[in-house]
Amino acid sequence: MSQPAQTVPQVSDPNVKLVIGAVVATLLLASLGQTIITTALPIIVADLGGIEHISWAITGYLLAATVAAPVFGKLGDMYGRKVMLQSGIAIFLAGSVLAAMSVDLNMLVFCRFIQGIGGGGLIVTAMAAIGDVLPPRERGKAQGFLGAAFGLSTVVGPLLGGLIVEALSWRWLFFVNIPIGIVAFAVIAIAFESRTKGHKRKIDYAGAALLTTALSALVIYTSIGGTILPWLSLQALVLPAIGIVAMIAFLMVELRAAEPILPLDLFRNNAFLVSNAVGFIVGTAMFGTITYMPSYLLIVQGFAPTQAGLALLPMMIGLIGSSTLSGIFIARTGRYKMLPIISTAILAVGALLLGTLGVETPFPLVMTYMLLVGIGIGPVMSVGVTAIQNAVPHSVLGVATASAQMFRQIGGSLGVAVLGAIFANRLAFETASIGHPEGTAAFNDATLAAMNAADQFAVLQAYTNALHPIYWVAAAAAAVASIIGWFLIEIPLSDRKPGAEPDAKAEPQAAE
């Protein structure tokens, strides 16, 4: 009876290490794809033109990654994670090569969309692949490594992008993906064994198309609302209307589909529902918090762009450290419920403290606040994925895992949009209240340098005051996520073999 236990794979097994290394490399490749071009955008615009559409170089990637997640997750369940990882790498590299050869911004945006399809597929398939090679108790440790890779890309991406642009050209931001992708492709081909049998399955084309339409409408609306078009303009409101109609049609199709792209029964699963609710809310708080910290460091603290990137290191250290340690804790104890509850409470405290920032806040104090935010973010995604994978049948492991990424990114899109609108309105109010004639145009180096000390302090204080509501909302969101975490029904992680189904006696399916 002891023989099966000896065959249960561990993170320390050489072949498993090789697979996890390849999976982490592919996930890092995909997540860097989103952040590496941020510091190079002004240079790209100078070369290709089209400054009015430059944000779509990032939004296009995010949109494609969001809509690709559930599709790749389902196809991974149907045809195996190995072939989907390799497909994702191939699509990502094709988009990278074409993006490097772009002759105008429209071509770059289109190529970034292709990149995003591959990148989104890689992220969700990488997380699901862990469930194919490790038992539930060991998955937490590996998911912690993946969470650390996400944290690393947040800070390293912009820094690496700046260094590449300064040393070579912006086109190398895309060429640099090729050797990493080829190595990851080869390692997966050699070491990874797909556990899904390749018998013929029906693809839910209608469900995939409708879900893609609904998600696209939502992401595009949050991207253009309040910037390109007013939120409540007729042209902008067409998008959420399309999204609602597509979502209703999607639900009707999924009820009848033989192989639904997103099985609706999953929403009756406690771990699926609670973990994704927490992930959605934390995505809102996380992206909103991270998006506006560099601007505070640049404008108020007076950092150079590279210095501002380095100043985010405390947040990255906190994120990587807490993600890794939470994985080790899960592997040793088999427990996980308290981790997101505690971490989101820490995130709420960190965001609340960021809401006290002023013009003269000492930088060591700012670093401490950012460290707390990083600690709070770190465990959420990896623990959520581990909990979901532990509670669903292996036949839907991929699509259930993809949901975690999908809900987090949707939350992030909404967070950036809503918090951006709050910031813009508050900034207009603050600059008007001090009666400064420059208004919101005052926040550039030349204008600030021309002011006397008193005016400069007043303008910078107005800017920090406008940031405060962002962090208050983020803190409230994190507090709500912490409360929701208490509703998670914990199923202790077992040492069952990869591919084995959850213990029916231990698996509460209904959300409470």
Image: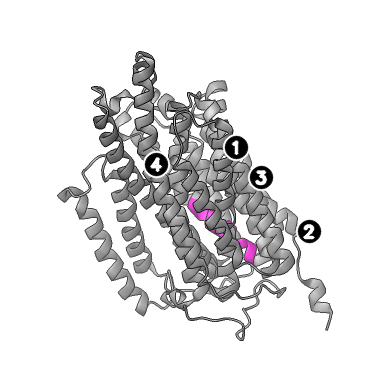
Tag 4: amino acid: His
The picture places residue 454, in percent across and down from the top left corner, at 36, 19
Question: Disc 2 on helix, strand or loop?
Answer: loop
- Label ID, residue 468: 4
The picture places residue 20, in percent across and down from the top left corner, at 68, 55
**Label whose residue precedes the other's in the sequence (4 or 2):** 2
Which tag is nearer the camera, tag 4 or tag 2?
4
The picture places residue 337, in percent across and down from the top left corner, at 59, 68
Few, some or many residues within 10 Å of mark 1 (<14, 14–19, 20+): many
- Residue 313 colored magenta? no
The rendered magenta stretch, by its main secondary structure, is classed as helix
Asked whether, in this view, residue 445 is left or right of residue 174, the answer is left
Tag 3: amino acid: Val
Q: Which residue is mark 3?
A: 183
Tag 1: amino acid: Leu
Few, some or many residues within 10 Å of mark 2 (<14, 14–19, 20+): few
Q: What residue is rendered at 42% in x and 30% in y? A: 41
The residue segment tinted magenta is 120-131
Few, some or many residues within 10 Å of mark 4 (<14, 14–19, 20+): many
Q: Is residue 185 visible?
A: no
**Label whose residue precedes the other's in the sequence (2 or 1):** 2
As measured in the structure, the alpha-carbon distance from the residue carrying label 3 to the one carrying label 1 is 28 Å
Residue reaching furthest to the left: 234
Which tag is nearer the camera, tag 1 or tag 4?
4
Q: Nearer the viewer, residue 18 or 491?
A: 491
Q: How is the image coloured?
A: one colour
Q: Which residue is mark 2?
A: 12
**Label whose residue precedes the other's in the sequence (3 or 4):** 3
- Residue 364 vertical placement versus 332 (above, below): above
As measured in the structure, the alpha-carbon distance from the residue carrying label 4 to the one carrying label 2 is 45 Å
